[in-house]
Image (cartoon, rainbow, N blue to C red):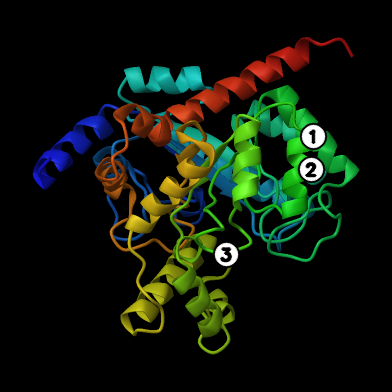
Amino acid sequence: MRADEISERARAIHFSSLVFDTHADTPQRLLFDQFDLANRDAEGCVDIPRLREGGVGAIFFALWVPVEITGVAATRRARDLLDATRKQIEIHRGDLALATSAKEIRMARAENKIAVLLGIEGGHAIDSDLAVLCEFHALGVRYMTLTHNAATEWADSSNAAPRHNGLADFGKKVILEMNRLGMLVDVSHVSDLAFHDVLETSRAPVVASHSCCRALCDAPRNLDDSQIVALAAKGGVIHITFHDGFLSQEYANAYRALATEDAFDEQAARKIYGGNEARMLIEEQRWSDESIRAGKLPQVSWEKIVEHIDHAVGVAGADHVGVGSDFDGAFMPAGMEDAAKFPLITEGLLRRGYREADIRKILGANTLRVMDDADRAGRMLRSEKP
C-alpha cells in the first residue's frame, strides 16, 4: 500500500475503534488551575477538543498524591482531585460521562461521549484503611496504583529502598479487597518483589496502567519480559506509557547524567508556585524541552511508543497490551505532545503489519475485557459465603 493509503486506512480503523488511555494526570490542572476541559490549551496535553481530535473514547484520570503528602492529608488530596474531576464531568455532560464499568464506557460511546474513569495513583491515599478504599470505590474509583515513588506502609516501590520485601500482610488484604470490589489492581510503580506478591495474591487479572518494556529501556519502573509474561498469564494487560525516560535508554542515561549537574530546580519552582503540582509538572516539561533544544538531552520520537508496543506483543501476545499515556504528568516524545496525536499509534502499528483486529485490541478492547474480568471476579467473590 502507498503511504497515503496506509494513513487513510489507519484513520478509518482508529476512529471506528474505542481508544482507551489508562493514565492521565490532568486532575492536577482541574484542581490547582481550575482548568476548564472545554478549552483547547497551549499548555498541557488533555482537553475535550484534543481528545476528540485524537479519537479518545475513554480515559482514566489519575488522582495522583505526591509521596510527601501522607496520612489524612493524602486522603483529602485524593478527594479534592476527585471532586474537581467530577465537577468538570458534570459541567460538560454533553461531552463527558463518568464511567465505572466497561458497560458504562460502551454506553458513553453510543452517546458520542468521552468516558472518564477515576484511578488513584499512590496507595498511601487510603491511609492504610480499607474503609477509605471502599469509600473511594463508592465515589467511582476503579483502579489504584499501589505505590508511587516511595514505599507505602504496606507495599514497596520500584523507585525506593524496600521496606517490606514486596507486600506486607496488610498489602495482601488491600489486594483482596480490591478484588472483592471489582477494582483493577495497578502494578505500575511497584517493586519487582511487590509485583510478584500481587500476582500471587490477586484473584483477578492485574494491570500495569502506564509502564514500558525494560528490555528496551532499563528503568526500574518498566517491566521485564518475565513480568510481562506473568501478567499476561493472569489475564492482565501492560499499558505502554509515553514518558521519554521509560521509552528511550539514551534519554534515560542522559537524564541521569544531567540530573547531577543541571537538574530541574524543584526548590526554586516551589518558591514560585507553592503547592501547585499542575504548574510544577508543566515547568518540568518546559525544562525537558529546553534541555533537548540545548542538546543536553536527546529528542525521543513518538515511534518509540510503537516499538515498545511491538515488543510487548512479541512477548505476551496482542491480547495483553494497551496504552497509558501519562499525559500531563511526564515528558512526552516528539510527535506525541498531546491527545490529538493518538492516531499516529494506529498508523505506526499498521505500517508494522498489524492486523486490524489486533490494533483494535491494543487501542482499547483489551482494557474493556480486563475491566469486565475484574468486575466478574468481584461479583463472584462478593457472592461467596464468609
Cα gap from disc 1 to disc 2, whole angstroms: 6 Å
Front position in the image: 284 or 199? 199
Residue at the (74%, 26%) spot, across then down: 203
Taking the image as shown, residue 174 lies to the left or right of residue 291, namely right
Residue at the (61%, 58%) spot, across then down: 221
Taking the image as shown, residue 175 lies to the left or right of residue 356, namely right
Where is 145 relative to 149, above or below?
A: above
User: Looking at the figure, which quarter contains the N terminus?
Assistant: top left
The image position of residue 343, as x and y in percent, is 27, 43
Residue at the (65%, 30%) spot, across then down: 205
Secondary-structure class at tag 1: helix
Secondary-structure class at tag 3: loop
* Residue that carries the numbered disc 2 in the rendered image: 197
Front position in the image: 268 or 67? 67
* Residue that carries the numbered disc 1 in the rendered image: 201
Label 1 with label 2: CB-CB less than 8 Å: yes
Cα gap from disc 2 to disc 3, whole angstroms: 22 Å
* Residue that carries the numbered disc 3 in the rendered image: 218
